[in-house]
């Protein structure tokens, strides 16, 4: 990298950890914030396992130690550490009331940032930008999971997002060796309007006892050439996140094709979120 950038990552869940790791691997100074002390402790452990995977898959990071990565990341529950950041990447749950509460807190704390990026999969960037005075500096950066291994990011242009913000975001992503694909702002954008239909219908197939999860995924992978099946993907993302996203899509479009499969909701009620809890459509 030509320049070390300061990055604030909000939310120490699956995506937040991946985003923080990716920036740290590329020599950025990262502040990872969460409201939960347990989430931050789990994030430190998760970073180690994620790094091992990255080192196996990407030779250029084979020499990087866990200590080096952790030295680039500050773990915090406090806003005092968020000072004059180049970019904030928000990764909290896909719930509008929760997000809106966070944005109010950010405004009250008078946090300074050049770009506010939302790693949302479904919620409108224009709606989010309406919560900020500098709406032209708000953009969607939909990172794919696992973040350090994916080389594209869906960049979502809100109604007021400026060309300067898009250019800056593209430069930052280039430093991460990721291709920016700019799309317009509609709930779900491109990736999730497609992927969630696949995952939801696959869950209906399990619910209707048409086939087992492994058979459904195998047909999808071998038939369509995808590396992962829709149910494997749902487990990786987190079934709770999938359900939240489907609910947002259904509410925004009022289209029955986005009606969440009852089996998905039942599994979430039971606490079977997928890989992060050790059980979803598969056991881990």
Image (tube, grey):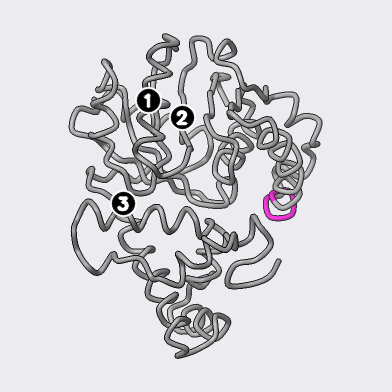
Circle nearer the viewer, 3 or 2: 3
Circle nearer the viewer, 3 or 1: 3
Are the residues tagged 3 and 2 within 8 Å (C-beta)?
A: no
Magenta-span inclusion, residue 39: no
Q: Which mark is residue 242?
A: none
Q: Would you call the spot at circle 2 few (<14 residues within 10 Å), some (14-19), or many (20 or more)? A: some
User: What is the C-alpha distance between the residues marked 3 and 2?
Assistant: 29 Å
Q: Say which residue appears at 63% left-offset and 32% top-offset.
A: 36
Q: Would you call the spot at circle 1 few (<14 residues within 10 Å), some (14-19), or many (20 or more)? A: some
Q: Which residue is mark 2?
A: 172
User: What is the C-alpha distance between the residues marked 3 and 1?
Assistant: 29 Å
Q: Quadrant of residue 276?
A: bottom right
Q: Quick one: SS at disc 2? A: helix
Q: Which residue is mark 3?
A: 248
User: What is the C-alpha distance between the residues marked 1 and 2?
Assistant: 6 Å
Main SS, magenta residues: helix
Q: Left or right of 21: which side holds 120?
A: left
Magenta-span inclusion, residue 56: yes
Q: Earlier in the sequence, mark 3 or mark 1?
A: 1
Q: Which mark is residue 168?
A: 1
Q: Give the answer, above or below, for where 92 lies relative to 49.
A: above
Are the residues tagged 1 and 2 within 8 Å (C-beta)?
A: yes
Q: Left or right of 5: which side holds 279?
A: right
Q: Quick one: SS at disc 3? A: helix
Q: Left or right of 24: which side holds 99?
A: left
Q: Earlier in the sequence, mark 3 or mark 2?
A: 2
Q: How many marks?
A: 3
From which residue to which does the magenta span run?
54-58
**Is 81 or 6 nearer to us in this picture?**
81
Q: Quick one: SS at disc 1? A: helix
Q: Say which residue appears at 31% left-offset and 43% top-offset.
A: 123
């Amino acid at each position: 990298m030509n320049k070390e950038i300061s990055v604030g990552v909000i939310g120490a869940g699956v995506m937040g950890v991946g985003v923080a790791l990716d920036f740290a691997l590329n020599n950025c100074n990262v502040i990872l914030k969460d409201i939960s002390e347990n989430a931050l402790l789990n994030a430190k452990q998760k970073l180690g396992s994620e790094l091992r995977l990255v080192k196996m898959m990407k030779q250029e990071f084979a020499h990087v130690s866990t200590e080096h990565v952790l030295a680039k990341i500050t773990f915090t529950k406090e806003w005092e550490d968020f000072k004059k950041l180049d970019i904030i990447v928000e990764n909290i749950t896909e719930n509008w009331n929760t997000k809106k509460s966070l944005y109010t807190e950010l405004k009250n704390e008078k946090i300074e940032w050049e770009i506010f990026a939302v790693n949302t999969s479904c919620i409108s960037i224009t709606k989010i930008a309406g919560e900020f005075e500098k709406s032209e500096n708000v953009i969607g950066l939909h990172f794919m999971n696992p973040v350090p291994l994916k080389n594209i990011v869906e960049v979502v242009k809100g109604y007021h997002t400026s060309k300067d913000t898009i250019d800056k975001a593209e430069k930052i992503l280039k430093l991460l060796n990721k291709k920016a694909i700019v799309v317009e702002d509609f709930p779900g954008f491109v990736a999730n309007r497609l992927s969630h239909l696949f995952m939801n219908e696959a869950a209906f197939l399990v619910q209707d006892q048409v086939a087992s999860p492994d058979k459904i995924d195998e047909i999808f992978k071998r038939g369509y050439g995808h590396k992962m099946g829709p149910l494997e993907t749902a487990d990786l993302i987190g079934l709770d996140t999938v359900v939240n996203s489907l609910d947002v899509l259904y509410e925004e479009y009022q289209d029955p094709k986005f009606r969440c499969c009852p089996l998905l909701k039942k599994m979430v009620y039971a606490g079977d979120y997928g890989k992060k809890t050790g059980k979803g459509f598969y056991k881990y």
